[in-house]
Image (tube, helix red, strand yellow):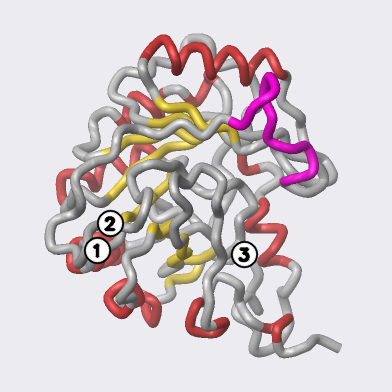
Amino acid sequence: MLSIMDRIDPTDERATGSTTHHPAGDAPPSRWESWNPVTGCTKVSEGCRHCYAERFAERWRGIPGHHYERGFELQLRPERLDLPLHWRTPRRVFVTSMGDLFHARIPDEYVRAVFAVMERAPQHVYHLLTKRHERMLELAPTLPWPQQVWMGVTVERTDYAARADALRRVPAARRHISAEPLLGPLDTLDLTGIDLVIAGGESGVDRRPPQPAWVRGLRDRCAAAGVAFSFKGWGGRGQNDGGRLLDGRVWDEAPPRAAPPAGSAGGAPAGADESGLPAQGALF
């Protein structure tokens, strides 16, 4: 029998009354929040093959009353749209950690509504990540881009480098690349205009482990280009099983701290502009 806590969506702060801290990459640690006005997605590239969010959501498919009763089917969650407006403490917010805001089946108006909320709540710093760079570029001119919005794309192999090219054309104040899961060397990836690269291995039973040379090569290219580099870990059956050490140390570099977002009370969260996204598999 499932307990009450088993039925709570771990991404819903209103249900749990608390949030999870993710110190990896924080300097100093600050409060992470997940905001999911959309949940569910469909596979679009190799990095999706063993999607941690899908694995989690599908565990609950068919359970009456559970937030993921329909598993990982794409669903709009309009009841969650205004959540950041009610958070008094400045936070770093992972937007749609359980989906992709630029999925083709999400209406343009709904994407604009999400961005409008981010604009109205400038006390938070928002991190977005997509694999759908074409839709991102299509909608970018119609969206507000307040300075506290970080935009990122996943580049798991060099054959997806076009996502980084598209990212450079988006007027975001910060741009980051997630090489997680890292599935091959990124020796030719153009890092021009990129503030941060986050690398990490895949998790799960059927994971495809990264080669150390791929990670070292990416780290060294970031250093040469003056781009901050963060390594989230080697992955394993569980995300943290392989540890985070690369050549004997943890890599948590960060771009220079930006000015506090306009209109924020007391500025951005501690370290708000000094870290990348949470580790893959951070369901919070």
Which residue does the numbered mark 2 point to in the structure image?
Answer: 268
* Residue 217 drawn above or below residue 131: above
Residue at 51 percent of width and 42 percent of height = 25
Q: Earlier in the sequence, mark 2 or mark 1?
A: 1
Residue 236, numbered circle: none
Quarter of the image with the C terminus is bottom right
Residue 72, numbered circle: 3
Q: Nearer the viewer, residue 99 or 227?
A: 227
- Report the amino acid beneath label 2: Ala
Please check the rendered image and state whether residue 204 is part of the magenta-colored stretch, yes or no: no
Q: Nearer the viewer, residue 132 or 183?
A: 183
- The answer to the question of whether label 1 and label 3 lie on touching residues, with beta carbons closer than 8 A, is no
Q: Earlier in the sequence, mark 3 or mark 2?
A: 3
C-alpha distance separating marks 1 and 3: 31 Å
Viewer can see residue 199: no
Front of the two marks 1 and 3: 1
Q: Which residues are magenta?
A: 240-250
Q: Earlier in the sequence, mark 1 or mark 3?
A: 3
Classify mark 2: helix, strand or loop. Answer: loop
* Residue 274 drawn above or below residue 101: above
User: Label 3 neighbourhood size at 10 Å, few (<14), some (14-19), many (20+)?
Assistant: many
Q: Nearer the viewer, residue 105 or 273?
A: 273
Quarter of the image with the N terminus is bottom right
Viewer can see residue 49: yes
Residue 123, numbered circle: 1
- The answer to the question of whether label 3 and label 2 lie on touching residues, with beta carbons closer than 8 A, is no
- The answer to the question of whether label 2 and label 1 lie on touching residues, with beta carbons closer than 8 A, is yes
Asked whether, in this view, residue 257 is left or right of residue 43, the answer is left
Please check the rendered image and state whether residue 249 is part of the magenta-colored stretch, yes or no: yes
* Residue 108 drawn above or below residue 241: below
Image coordinates of residue 134 in percent, x first then y, are: 35, 37
